[in-house]
Structure formats: structure tokens, C-alpha cells
Image: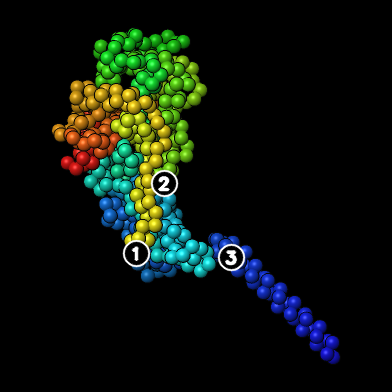
Amino acid sequence: MIRYIRRAAAFCLLLLIALLLNASRIQIFKAQDYEDNPANRRKTIARYDQPRGNLLVDGKPVTGSRDTGEGLRYERTYPHGPLYAPVTGYASQTYGTTLLENAEDDVLSGTDPLLAPFPFWNEITREQQPGGDVRTTIKAAVQQAAYGGLGGKKGAVAAIEPKTGKILALASTPSYDPERLSGTGSAVGDAWTNLNASKSQPMLNRALKQTYPPGSTFKVVTAAAALDNGEVSDIDAPTDSPAPYTLPDTRTQLPNEASGCKNATLRYAFQVSCNTVFAKLGNDVGLDGMVGASEGFGFNDDDLTVPSRVVKSNFDTEMNASQVALSSIGQFDTTATPLQMAMVSAAVANGGEVKKPYLVDKITDSGGDTVSTTGDRTLHRAMESDTASKLQQMMVGVVTKGTGTNAAIPGAEVGGKTGTAQHGVDNKGTPYAWFLSWARADGADDPAVAVAVVVEDASANRADISGGGSAAPIARAVMRAALGG
């Protein structure tokens, strides 16, 4: 009898060991799989069981949380929704997260290990910390000037501090209120359907996610390439440029909107935006030189994040000579985001260095203690410092006596470049009006801001007057705000 009892006891011990091993397997090795299973609502309930951390502008929250008393307790609120939507994105219980709400989701939801009191605390306890706050680089006055300047027209503004890469404004219009998407239920579903069906695409972040032909504003890049490659050494010497210019290997003649472009100096050609001079210079520099110059400014970079991902700006790497010439005046397949063109302007203002643009200044925990900061970082050297100095002179000339006089600001040195990009079948679409600029207060060592403005539905009769008339006043308002005026 004792023998049978021992066998039964041994069998029970084996069952107990197997049970413990299986429990350990589930708790240690399979826990994450069960936690991530879509059928497990505990993680979702826990996620919304506490207020979300906030996104801050000038130290003040531009987001909030509302206690609904429901199963998914806290919903996101946006006190200034449309104004900051291109920065914040949305945090929706139904549709997920976008932009900074997405890029910094771990911090805002309290799951980032940076917020834990000790290393590996979250992994051991599986606790969710109170949400941290994300302090952005956005300046409220600059953002308001950008958004208000666009006035509801289709378009975008990007503004950067040239010396650091801090993004001071990202505006995109028409905009939308992210709070309409925060919760659950039929109202949220209807809002989602209506926003996505709208022809004006209010949820499209035109500053980061939309590319446009840059038109004559790309002549900044072409001028830098011509100077760095030795095609031009003296910006006040005549260029060997016919007007009109016959595109290489074709019978197509490229005209000018401005007069006096035949053999014009680089300074004058830039000031009045001669297509013929810059198309020829681009062809003289050649494909490899133009590709190298454009990539030095950030074109063809598919990995740029701010920390939200920025879509790639394009300069083709395989073209014939006539296509190179057209690309050099911002046409053919050349496309750019407003942020990319702000980087072009910032590179000129910063002596040729392209700083990595960024939106997050620092991250703090729920107690206000800093857990991480973002420092400035150089991405590329776009041009030699002497070339940047010459381009600064040329951009100032555009504002003082060229096509960009509408951007002038008393008490500040302002450089600019107008442009208009044709688009649509046979270029029948309303041209896009562009303006690039930078501004330095009198007596200041460094420019305070570099700006790119694009207006999709501007009225235009000729190329560069469109940028000067429609986009330059918006840029001026943004620069004045950045200068504190």
C-alpha cells in the first residue's frame, strides 16, 4: 500500500512541477503575447485610465484630458485644436495617434522607461507611470502668425531657427480640430468620414507630408551649386546666358518673365529671377553636381524625422541635359516640402550648415523633472561659407529692390526669394506661390528665423510676382513674430 501511495505522491509532484513550469512559461515568456493580444482589453483600459501627458508650447499645455467616467476613462482635448493640429496630430481611442502624439506616445501615455523611478521598473512591475510632458520648440506667437497669415487658404508655413534647427512654427491650412476624433461612438466615426472625404484635405499636414514643385525658390540651390562648382566666381560679372535659352538637345525655348536677363549677372538674375540664367547654370554644373548640391540641402533624404517622419523631397538622380536644366529652376520632377525649403533658407542664413530640424525641446516627468533634452545637430554642409555669404547678399537684394519687397521689415535685415511653380495638365492649374526668407534683427549676431511659405490657391499673372504678392506678406508676419515685433 505504501508503495502505491509513494507512486501517487510522485505523480502529483510531477503534476505540480508541470503546473509551476507552465505558469512560469505563461507569466514570464508568454506574458507579452497575451498582453498584446487584440482581445485583451486590459491594456487599452489601463492606457486610458489616467490623464495623458501634455504637449507644451512656451511652457503652456496645448492639449488636455477629459474624464468621461466611461470604461475608457480619459479622452484627449485640444483647446486650440486647428492652430496646433499640424504639430500635435491627434490621439484617438478609435483611430490611434499621429504626428507628435504618435512619435512621443510612450512618454505621453506613461509607458516610456525614461519615466520609471528605477531602471527596468516598468518591466518588473508592469506598472504604467503618470504621463510625461513634451515641451516643443514651437513659439506661440510665430505659430499664430503663420496660421493667421494663411487665412484658411490651402497652404503651409515652416519656420526654423537657423543656428539650432528648432522648428518655431508648422502651419497647414485648411486645418481641423483633432478633438473631434478623440473618443468613441458615432460622432467620432462621422467626423472621421467627413474629414477624409473633404476635397480640401484638412488632415493633410502640408508642411511635412506634402511636396510641391518649388519653382524659382530652387534657384537658391542652383546658385549655391554654380558658386561651389566654380561656374560663377563673381556674382557681379556677366554670365554667358542667352535669352531665350534653348533647352539642350531640343528646339524648346525657355523664356523669361523678367527683362534684362541676357548675359545678366548672377546677382541681377537672382534678384529678378531669370529662368534662362539658372537653367543654363544648372546644365553647366551637370547632373552629378546638381544632385550633390540638392542632397547637401536635404533632398532625397527618406529618413528625416522631427521626430514625426517628413516625406522625401525629390531631385532626380537620372536625367538628360534638358531635364537637368528644367529641374534647376524647380520644375520637371523636382518637389519639396515646405520644411525642406525652410531648411534651404536656414542653410544660407547659417553660413552653409544645415541643422537637423526638431520639434521636441525636452521631456519632463509628471513632477516636472527633465528626463531628456534634444541638442542641435548638423546634418550637412550645403555650401562653402563664402558661397553662403554671397547668397545672403543676393537674397537681401531680392527684398530691397527685387521681387520680394513685400517682405521688408524695418529694423531688420531680411533676405528672400520668390517663386511660383506651375502645375496641372499643360500647366493650367493655378500656380503655387512660394516665398523663402530669413531675418536678422539689426545688431544681432545670428538670424532669428528662416521661413518657407507656399500658397496653393494664390492668384498669379506672372511667375515671381505671385510669390512676392501672395506668400511674402505671410513670411513677413512670421518673421516679425520671431523677431519679437
Q: Earlier in the sequence, mark 1 or mark 2?
A: 2
**Residue type of the residue flagged with mark 1:** Gly
Q: Residue at x 36, y 63 (%)?
A: 366
Is 310 placed above or below 403 here? below
What kind of residue is marked 3? Ala
Residue 8 found in image quarter: bottom right
The numbered mark at residue 307 is 2
Q: Which residue is mark 3?
A: 31
Q: Nearer the viewer, residue 65 or 57?
A: 57
Q: Is residue 386 above or below residue 370?
A: above
Under tag 1, what secondary structure?
A: loop
Which label sits on residue 367? 1
Residue 36's label in the rendered image is none
The reply to whether discs 2 and 3 touch (Cβ–Cβ < 8 Å) is no
Q: Is residue 72 visible?
A: no
* Quarter the C terminus occupies: top left
Q: Secondary structure at mark 2?
A: loop
Query: Which mark sits nearer the N-terminus, 2 or 3?
Result: 3
Quarter location, residue 372: bottom left
Residue at x 32%, y 24% (from the top left corner)? 386
